[in-house]
Image (cartoon, rainbow, N blue to C red):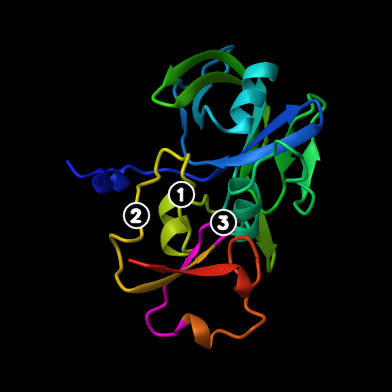
Amino acid sequence: MKPLVLGNITYGMYAIGVKDKNGPSACIVNTVMQVTKTSPGAPPLIALSVNTENYSCQCIEESGVFTISVLSESTPATVIGALGFTSGRHGGKLENIRHKVLMEGVPVIKENTCCWFLCQVKAKLPVGGQVLFVAEIVAGSDIAGGIETAGKFEAYKPMTYQYYVEKLGGISPTKAPTYLSGQQAERITGERFVCSVCGYEYKDPNFGFEELPTDWSCPICKMPKKAFVRKKG
């Protein structure tokens, strides 16, 4: 079996809020799922997979709490760039992102997100360089987020990993379960330009990278054109 076929498994896009001694932080994951149904008197359980090398994993293990903010297709790509491709070890990841901090000390992202959940860890299982956390949802949104236009409310549509890749041109960080070595090299050949900060690859076959205006910036992390490096493959 070729690893690329695993891309047929569906994923979402989520911001995981954590806390440490320096305050709130967050990261991006695509592996969250509900594992029990909602029933009277029994809060639902969810499963979350986080790489053991991620600082957020350490924060969850130490505090036992985290939040899940469900990203929507209207969530700015800069949120994914800021939270998904930089470490929270030294703080500052939330500086330019709208959010609120719950009384438990963990943040909830407010950048056009669908909803949020506050989770309490009940069990954890190390698996293949990841930690699988099973947690109880103890609080969360009452209704889904959305926008109202012409007197009609329209709920945000949850962002899928496929949407992130195909519509936003995003890639998985090296520590993500969905990362594939040389994943872009299998899709295209020839000259490529890649953001040295977040890994976004510019690959418009009809408009060369050199033709982009000088004030063009990375659609994921907003770094300037000069942050891109040439790659062959």
Q: Are marks 2 and 3 in contact (CB under 8 Å)?
A: no
Quarter holding residue 208: bottom left
Residue 197 inside the magenta-drawn segment: yes
Residue 219: % across, % down: 58, 67
Q: Residue at x 44, y 27 (%)?
A: 129
Residue farthest to the left, as pictured: 1
- Disc 3 marks which residue? 198
Q: Find the distance from the CA under tag 3 to the CA under tag 1.
A: 10 Å
Q: Disc 1 or 2, which lies upstream in sequence?
A: 1
Q: Is residue 30 visible?
A: yes
Magenta residue span:
196-208
Residue type, numbered disc 1: Ser
Dot 1: element:
loop
Tell me, yes or no, whether the highlighted magenta stretch contains residue 130.
no
Q: Which residue is mark 1?
A: 172
Q: CA distance from mark 1 to mark 2?
A: 9 Å
| Sequence-first disc among 3 and 1 | 1
Position of 186 with respect to 204 (left or right) is left
Q: Nearer the viewer, mark 3 or mark 1?
A: 3
**Residue on which the image places disc 2:** 183
Main SS, magenta region, reads loop
In the rendered structure, the answer to whether residue 1 lies left or right of residue 191 reads left
